[in-house]
Image: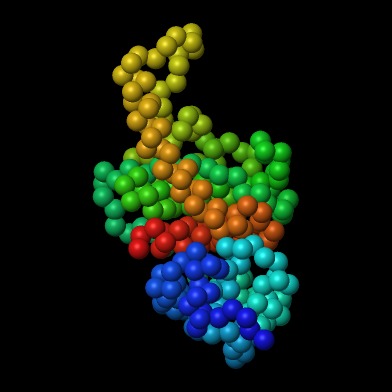
Amino acid sequence: MQVISASRSEWIAPFTGLEPGQFRKLVRIVASRGGDEIADGRPGRQWRLDLADRVLLVATYWRTNLTMRQIGPLFGVSHSAAHRVIDTMGPLLALASVRKRRIDAIAIVDGTLVPTRDHRLAAPSKNYRYSANVQVAIDADTRLVIATGDAHPGNRNDCTVYRDSGIEQELAVRPVMADGGYQGNPEVIMPYRKPRDRSDLADWQEDLNADHRKIRARVEHALARMKYWKILRDYRRAASTLNDTVSGIAHLHNILLAD
């Protein structure tokens, strides 16, 4: 017996964070990417759930971080079928590349630690949990996520992961702001640091640092909003799926923020 269905709009907002109109927009995007053409793991075998319910299942899973044995019965399918839905549909929700952007548009980048149970990727980090370092960049004006980097072990510092995750190449043609942890990346705009002799910064430098902190805080707010989708607080799936999950949640965040 199916409990949750996209045909009942009152279930959409509590379980996905999206309004019904935003959710329908997401379903149309997934359909345009071939979501309706995918069979259930075997040639000719159709999904038990229609496209809207499959998208709802993925968004609900990301939002609630229920186990497969919990989320399957909510949609009237087995836990193995729920697993196949998430594996197949998740990549179709990924963030699309930004095609048009102003030359002077400023990006803000920051890293966040995602607790990850798959030790093939995760490593003990500063919070003493096995985590992955994920880089996220937003547009400073719109606050929309414009790029996400490939996940790296949580014990890697931001300045290294920024170069190795692919996000540096995504942001190569625009100015980029970041905190002081991105030393070694000269193209990144960072706050002024105190001289080695520990003398005070000039007043104008302190003023610029204050402005820098106010603007850079926008990416921290975006990261906090992305973690409303609770799967980013305890990632139990295989590490190979983390990149698609982060990108998909960034897409949901953008839909929610843009409308």
Q: Position of residue 41 (x, y in %)?
A: 64, 81
Along the line of sight, the residue nearer the viewer: 203 or 19? 19
Q: Residue furthest front?
A: 10
Q: In which quadrant of the rendered image does the N terminus lie?
A: bottom right
**Left or right of residue 117: residue 148:** left
Is residue 15 visible in the rendered image? The answer is yes
In the visual, does 30 lie left or right of 130? left
Residue ID at (55%, 61%): 244
Number of marks drawn: 0
Question: Which quadrant does the C terminus fall into?
Answer: bottom left
Estimate the x, y position of residue 229 in percent, counting from the top left.
Answer: 56, 58
Location of residue 63 in the rendering, given as x and y in whole percent from the top left corner:
57, 63
Q: Report whether 133 appears left or right of 171.
A: right
Instruction: Name the side, left or right, on which 49 lies relative to 103.
Output: right
Q: How is the image coloured?
A: rainbow
Depth check: give the residue in front, 4 or 154: 4
Q: Position of residue 256 (x, y in %)?
A: 42, 61
Q: Does 187 sit above or below residue 220? A: above
Residue drawn at the location 45% of the way across and 58% of the way down: 253
Whether residue 148 is situated above or below residue 37 in the rendered picture: above
Q: Is residue 21 above or below residue 133?
A: below
Residue at 55%, 81% in the rendered image: 5
